[in-house]
Amino acid sequence: MEKTISGITIECIKGDIVSQPDITAIVNAANAQLRMGGGVAGAIHSAAGPGLEEECHPLAPIKPGEAVITGGHRLPNRFVIHCLGPVFGVDKPEDTLLANCYRNTLKLAEQYKIDSIAFPAISTGAFGYPVEEAAEVAFRTIIGIVPKLRYVKRIRFVLYSESDLDIHEKIMSALKSRI
Ligand code: AR6
């Protein structure tokens, strides 16, 4: 599913964040130390190779809601933007911190004149954020920022499961009627 708002395409697909060769920057659901870890971070570091951890080392630690940028190393993408989502029930207020992830990531993307970006569903895996609530925060934040974007033209959500895709599509269609 995709829709265009203020000339920017927002889309949801089912897939793997490390297999988005047409996208300039992919987003890592990182850990504070910017190390390999599991889930998205594990997949990104495995695909990028050890050079990514080396580049990350001096940038760590980061706080919930913060984002930092590195090169893509062996990934097909030019950049990786690493952000630390909130741990649900621990880092509060969760919704503000999660919104900051999307806000700060898009801010960096603009600074680096990035035209396309792919997000995973930050915080919804190991960090336990309920997918539906997280998707509401993600879309609400992005919709608020979209009119201000100059360089980013495509924002892709890459969902790992059919059910996560369904939830994101449902929330995206509901948003349509509110715009
Ligand atoms: N591509 C797209 N989505 C994925 C992929 C993938 N390759 N792998 C998992 N997902 P998570 P978090 C989905 O746990 O909750 C790590 O260990 C997954 O199904 O990667 O922010 C880090 O080291 C879920 O819906 O990120 C941190 O310590 C979503 O991506 C911690 O987990 C996010 O899952 C970060 O936890």
Image (tube, rainbow, N blue to C red):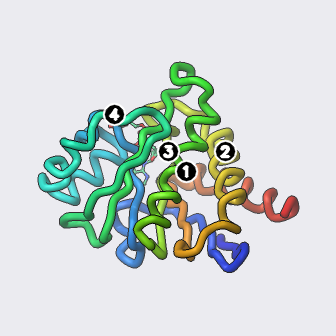
Q: Residue furthest top?
A: 90
Discs 2, 1 touching: Cβ within 8 Å:
yes
Ligand 1 lies under 8 Å from the Cβ of mark 2: no
First-in-chain label (3 vs 2): 3
Judging by the rendered image, the residue that carries numbered circle 4 is: 32
Q: Can you tell which mark lies on residue 102?
A: 1
In the rendering, at what x and y percent does residue 102 appear? 55, 51
Figure check: 131 above or below 154: above
List x then y, in percent, for residue 114: 44, 72
| Mark 2 element type | helix
Q: Disc 3 and disc 2: Cα gap in Å?
A: 11 Å
Residue that mark 2 sits on: 137
Q: Is the distance from the Cβ of mark 3 to the nearest ligand 1 atom less than 8 Å?
A: yes
Question: Where residue 60 sits in the image (x, y, percent)?
Answer: 27, 38
**Numbered disc 4: secondary structure:** loop
- The quadrant in which the N terminus is found is bottom right
Mark 1 element type: helix
Label 3 belongs to which residue? 122
At label 1, which amino acid type do we have?
A: Tyr
* Circles 3 and 1: CB atoms closer than 8 Å: yes
Q: Secondary structure at mark 3?
A: loop
Sequence-earlier tag: 2 or 1: 1
Q: Residue 97 at what x, y percent from top left?
A: 56, 35
Report the image quarter containing ligand 1: top left
Q: Residue at x 72, y 73 (%)?
A: 5
